[in-house]
Image (cartoon, rainbow, N blue to C red):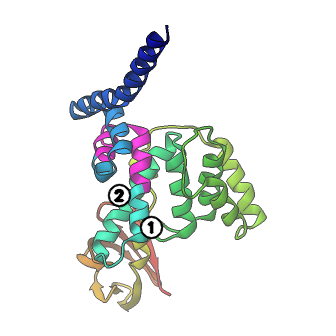
Amino acid sequence: MKNFLTVLALTATCAWAQSPVSTLEQIKIAADAGDPAAQDKMAERDSANAESWYRKAAVQGYVHAQGKLGDLLFLRTRLTIGVKPEVRVATGEESIKWATLAANQGDKQGQATLAQAYLEGNLVQQDLIEAYKWGELSAKNPSPEFVLFTGAFTRDKAVLKMTAEQIEEAHKRVAAFVPHQVAKSELPEPAWIREIKLEGISGSPDHRLAIINNKTFAKNDQMTLKVVGKDILIRCLEIRESSVVVSVEGMDGTRELKLP
């Protein structure tokens, strides 16, 4: 009887030890075959290639991977030293894209990342109301997902800088939130937009000229500006007495630039 129990215990131990290996093999085979859920799981098990696995799943619309990829890239913009400005800008833009896609579909990590981005204002225009909204949504999210910058922490940091009216508006946005697929128009404006500046206006009302980032534009002129290491095509649509209306390649709608 004693020998039988010993054999039974050894068998159980071997089965338990082999199970994770077998499971990992199955996940790897499925991930290589293109399954996004398996790719997402591989990212958690293969840290050296986590970004690659998350990206493969994210482009297929796997929400959890989108949130994790957004956070991974967000952290990279904060911690990397000596990176060229254009690389940092591109990394930041991609981070916000994935975080926004995930957050709007109800992903806890995506919501927390987006809240922190709006609070800091380095990758997007600072918006305390949006920081509160996404922080609160992440804090209330029942997912057990661990996040570094918790929604509650970011929400409370935003509150310290907000007025009563802003807090009231944030409550309304939280209450109105419904998970959904994101339209392009819902992607936040990148922070580099604020680096496009109107520096002066000259000429007569019939023939005004505008100086934008040290380049002179007439109405309907378009030129490429170097903004934080990124080439940006700008078209001057209208020159007013103290402002101009421009379009920015890759961005929806128009922007009004005002004299300082």
CA gap, disc 2 and disc 1: 10 Å
Instruction: Tell whether 202 sits left or right of 156.
Output: left
43 w.r.t. 91: above or below = above
Residue 64 figure quarter: top left
The residue labelled by disc 2 is 94
Residue 11 figure quarter: top left
- Most common secondary structure along the magenta stretch: helix
- Whole-percent x and y of residue 10? 41, 21
| Amino acid of disc 1 | Leu
- Whole-percent x and y of residue 235? 29, 71
- Whole-percent x and y of residue 108? 54, 45
- Secondary structure under the numbered disc 1 in the rendered image: loop
* Residue nearer the viewer, 122 or 46: 46
In the image, what residue occupies the spot 46% across and 44% down?
102
- Earlier along the polypeptide chain: callout 2 or callout 1? 2
In the image, what residue occupies the spot 73% across and 69% down?
160
The residue labelled by disc 1 is 123
155 w.r.t. 24: above or below = below
- Whole-percent x and y of residue 30? 26, 29
- Secondary structure under the numbered disc 2 in the rendered image: helix
156 w.r.t. 111: above or below = below
Numbered tag placed on residue 88 in the rendering: none
Q: Magenta region: which residues?
A: 53-71
Instruction: Tell whether 202 sits left or right of 152.
Output: left
In the image, what residue occupies the spot 65% across and 57% down?
132
